[in-house]
């Protein structure tokens, strides 16, 4: 029997056959108030007696399946997405295992509620919707005590942390403290779609202020009502957070989430070799977009290296996608310079080009003056339509957050450049999508290869329903994180991220050869394949290792089996009373 040290309040006992029991150091009402130990009416009569729950619960005993039927019936009675979101969050704060089991059973239906697009509305309304604390909140008033705070946090073996400073949430920008809803939602997908146990996850808000005066003036605002920290003060704050994690949870992997473009690249480079970490907006978005474009190229019978790719949007996501596309072209034989010339990146000022004196993280994607010499444009800097026309773009990738930016004229021009243009309006939430799939089909006579960032219903064209693939980062980050955790990695390398993209491409081609992305309902299987590939890459690069006890059990001989064996699934465990542990 092996004990997994989880918390001062409970542990998991596992026998040699993998059977598990939960040992708890609480009883009575305290046990029912701890969301990860509460089974409600699924506590057996024997457990109720042993754990002093007699009389605290309804007399009936229910199974997990019965619980799922009951809570799903309640969910179905609600009509608005935000009401459904709040219902699920309330369930998470009562019976967490039941919450994950419900998501797993109805993932396709509920993913748009706990993740994009509804989570964007939840962030906007965070102060009004707030009910229960979750995770860690670090602010100027307590950052100096970060180590003390972490020392008493009741989860002892955190392996996956999603952290945000809320400066660039989805397509809605600075949301102050309300951005904490994003890490909470992301970690739900790590658990349901990536098999990462909720016993080992932690959402974190770095409350460094906000530049939204309306939030600062709001008497109900829950964050620090100060202007957003910048420069060295900001980096010192983040340094303190990383120091705390490295000390308290040295085996944790950090996912940086929704940091503004001004600091996202700096933070990643500053810390990625200090502690295993990656930025989902940069690397996850790049990996999932590359995978979709590669699948589209396969369906078109073409190579990526022969495309001209236009990326509309030069924030963290846009530049991350441009970087991934360049890497993909280089793997097909182009030099970096040749690939860079085939990737056109636009921001709010138009095409990134040398005549604009582009600097910072955008500089590597500035087009050379000589390459624009033959272009015919109206102004000094080419706009979107001019770039598509003069650059002969065959692939349009939208990461601008500008609704309907891909106009009919823009899309028809792309269709003139390619028989089967590839158009991905990837901005979230739905209201920020650069185009509607139905319009794209109409403007291209049904020739378009389309995928979106948010979920859309199939488009019926010529009597045939065409499913719209969702270029969702959830196809990348849960598996990437699980592989990094199982590999005890010291660094999340660029090669590991590219391997995750390759695994998604391979899964799609193998199981859904006529689609650009798999259905969301298969997220767990996708994540298993991604995690296996990432783990194999980490071992090959020498940045990870598998503990000796797992090697002795044959993990190296069957990496996929090893991943499957450690993929957490929501279920109620038998509960026994343990001797009191010191808190």
Image (tube, rainbow, N blue to C red):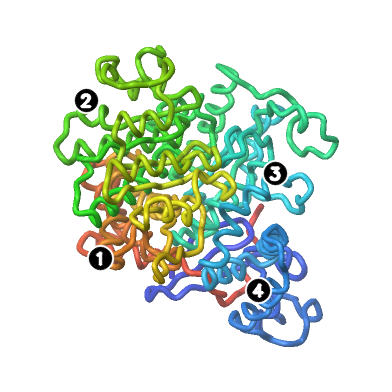
Q: How crowded is mark 1: few (under 14 residues within 10 Å), some or many (20 or more)?
A: few
Q: Label for residue 337?
A: 2
- The first of marks 1 and 2 along the sequence is 2
For the residues labelled 4 and 2, the Cα–Cα distance comes to: 58 Å
Secondary-structure class at tag 3: helix
Vertical arrangement, residue 577 with respect to residue 165, above or below? below
Q: Label for residue 124?
A: 3
For the residues labelled 4 and 3, the Cα–Cα distance comes to: 32 Å
Foreground mark, 4 or 3, reads: 3
Q: Label for residue 39?
A: 4
- The first of marks 4 and 1 along the sequence is 4
Foreground mark, 4 or 2, reads: 2
For the residues labelled 4 and 1, the Cα–Cα distance comes to: 39 Å
- The first of marks 4 and 2 along the sequence is 4
For the residues labelled 1 and 2, the Cα–Cα distance comes to: 33 Å
Q: Residues within 10 Å of mark 2 (few under 14, many from 20)?
A: few
- The first of marks 4 and 3 along the sequence is 4
Vertical arrangement, residue 328 with respect to residue 31, above or below? above
Foreground mark, 1 or 2, reads: 2
Q: Where is residue 391 in the image (x, y as percent from the top left)?
A: 30, 30
Q: Where is residue 236 in the image (x, y as percent from the top left)?
A: 56, 22
Q: Residue 298 falls in which quadrant of the image?
A: bottom left
- The first of marks 1 and 3 along the sequence is 3
Whether label 1 touches label 2, CB < 8 Å: no
Left or right, 418 with respect to 58, comes to left
């Amino acid at each position: 029997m092996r004990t997994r040290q989880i918390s001062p309040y409970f542990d998991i006992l596992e026998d040699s056959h993998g059977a598990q029991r939960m040992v708890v150091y609480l009883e009575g009402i305290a046990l029912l108030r701890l969301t990860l130990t509460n089974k409600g009416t699924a506590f057996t009569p024997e457990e109720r007696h042993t754990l002093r729950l007699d009389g605290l619960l309804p007399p009936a005993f229910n199974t997990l399946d019965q619980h799922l039927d009951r809570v799903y019936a309640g969910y179905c009675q609600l009509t608005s997405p935000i009401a459904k979101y709040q219902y699920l969050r309330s369930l998470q704060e009562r019976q967490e295992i039941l919450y994950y089991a419900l998501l797993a059973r109805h993932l396709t239906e509920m993913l748009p509620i706990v993740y994009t697009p509804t989570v964007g509305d939840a962030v906007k309304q965070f102060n009004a919707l707030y009910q229960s604390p979750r995770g860690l909140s670090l602010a100027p008033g307590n950052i100096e005590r970060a180590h003390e705070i972490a020392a008493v946090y009741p989860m002892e073996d955190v392996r996956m942390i999603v952290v945000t400073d809320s400066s660039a949430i989805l397509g809605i920008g600075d949301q102050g403290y309300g951005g904490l809803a994003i890490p909470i939602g992301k970690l739900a997908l790590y658990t349901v779609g990536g098999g990462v146990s909720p016993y080992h996850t932690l959402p974190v808000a770095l409350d460094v202020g906000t530049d939204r005066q309306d939030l600062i003036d709001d008497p109900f605002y829950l964050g620090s009502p100060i202007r957003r920290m910048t420069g060295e003060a900001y980096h010192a704050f983040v340094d303190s957070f990383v120091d705390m994690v490295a000390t308290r949870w040295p085996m944790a992997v950090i996912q940086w989430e929704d940091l503004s473009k001004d600091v996202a690249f700096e933070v990643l480079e500053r810390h990625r070799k200090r502690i295993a970490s990656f930025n989902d907006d940069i690397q996850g978005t790049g990996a999932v977009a590359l995978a979709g474009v590669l699948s589209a190229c396969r369906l078109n019978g073409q190579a990526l290296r022969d495309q001209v790719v236009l990326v509309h949007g030069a924030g963290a996501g846009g530049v991350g996608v441009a970087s991934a596309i360049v890497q993909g072209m280089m793997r097909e034989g182009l030099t970096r310079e040749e690939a860079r010339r085939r990737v056109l990146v636009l921001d709010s000022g138009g095409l990134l080009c040398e005549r604009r004196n582009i600097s910072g993280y955008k500089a590597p994607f500035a087009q050379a003056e000589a390459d624009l010499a033959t272009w015919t444009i109206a102004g000094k800097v080419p706009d979107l339509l001019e770039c598509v026309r003069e650059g002969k773009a065959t692939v349009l990738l939208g990461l601008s957050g500008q609704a309907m930016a891909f106009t009919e004229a823009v899309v028809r021009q792309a269709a003139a450049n390619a028989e089967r243009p590839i158009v991905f309006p990837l901005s979230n939430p739905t209201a920020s999508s650069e185009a509607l799939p139905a319009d794209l089909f109409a403007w291209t006579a049904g020739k378009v290869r389309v995928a979106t960032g948010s979920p859309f219903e199939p488009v019926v064209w010529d009597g045939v329903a065409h499913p719209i693939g969702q270029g969702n980062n959830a196809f990348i980050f849960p598996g990437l994180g699980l592989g990094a955790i199982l590999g005890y990695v010291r660094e999340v390398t660029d090669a590991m991220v590219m391997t995750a993209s390759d695994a998604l491409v391979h899964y799609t081609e193998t199981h859904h050869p006529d689609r650009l992305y798999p259905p969301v309902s298969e997220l767990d299987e996708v994540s298993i394949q991604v995690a296996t590939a990432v783990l194999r890459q980490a071992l090959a690069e020498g940045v990870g290792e598998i503990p000796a006890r797992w090697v002795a059990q044959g993990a190296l001989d069957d990496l996929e089996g090893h991943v499957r064996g450690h993929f957490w699934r929501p279920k109620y465990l038998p509960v026994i009373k343990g001797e009191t542990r010191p808190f």
